[in-house]
Image: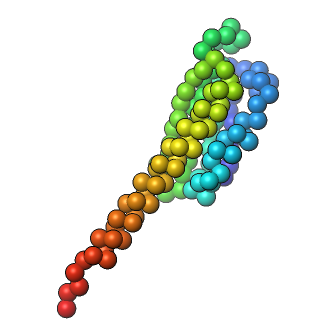
Amino acid sequence: MQIKIHFSGGKRSDFGNHDFERVLAGSLERSERRLKSAHLYITDVNGPKGGIDKHCRCVLHLRRMSPIVIQDQDASMNALLYRVANRASYALTQKVNRKNKRKRERVREYLMEPVSD
């Protein structure tokens, strides 16, 4: 899995000393084989003025599935980063579980078909 982080509205150092890659990779490691790449877009909307101005968008590009997009904003970069990582992990797990459930249902239907002689 490839993780790319994009910053807008400031340099990486302006967003604090957070290990963005480690947090995101740690939350997605369970379903890592399903991921092609993860992109994290971090924006400080109004600069150093304060307030709820930090915006984060996480795009997960999956193998053989449509991408997942998670967006959120907060005043605290730490809270924002962990919340987006947790939501991305949850959304990915749910999507994989839905796909596996449909696959199991198709196999069950096939096995239950009457055999014609």
Q: Is residue 116 left or right of residue 75?
A: left
| Residue lying at 63% horizontally and 17% vertically, measured from the top left | 75
Whether residue 4 appears in this view of the structure is: no
Q: Position of residue 104 (x, y in %)?
A: 39, 66
Residue 45 spot, x, y in % from top left: 62, 16
Most extreme residue toward the bottom is 117
In the displayed orientation, state which residue is furthest to the left. 117
Query: Which residue does the image show at 22% across and 81% down from the upper left?
Result: 114
**Residue 49: horizontal and vertical position, in percent?**
68, 8
Q: Nearer the viewer, residue 84 or 45?
A: 84
Give residue 9's quadrant in the image: top right
Camera-nearest residue between 31 and 40: 31
Residue 107: image quadrant is: bottom left
Where is 46 relative to 103, above or below?
above
- Can see residue 80? yes
Residue 86: where, in percent of width, then height?
59, 38
Residue 117 to residue 85: above or below: below
Quadrant containing the C terminus in the rendered view: bottom left
Residue in view at x 40 percent, y 64 percent: 103
In screen coordinates, is 70 left or right of 3?
A: left
- Residue lying at 48% horizontally and 54% vertically, measured from the top left: 96
The mark total stands at 0
26 is higher (above) or lower (below) than 98: above
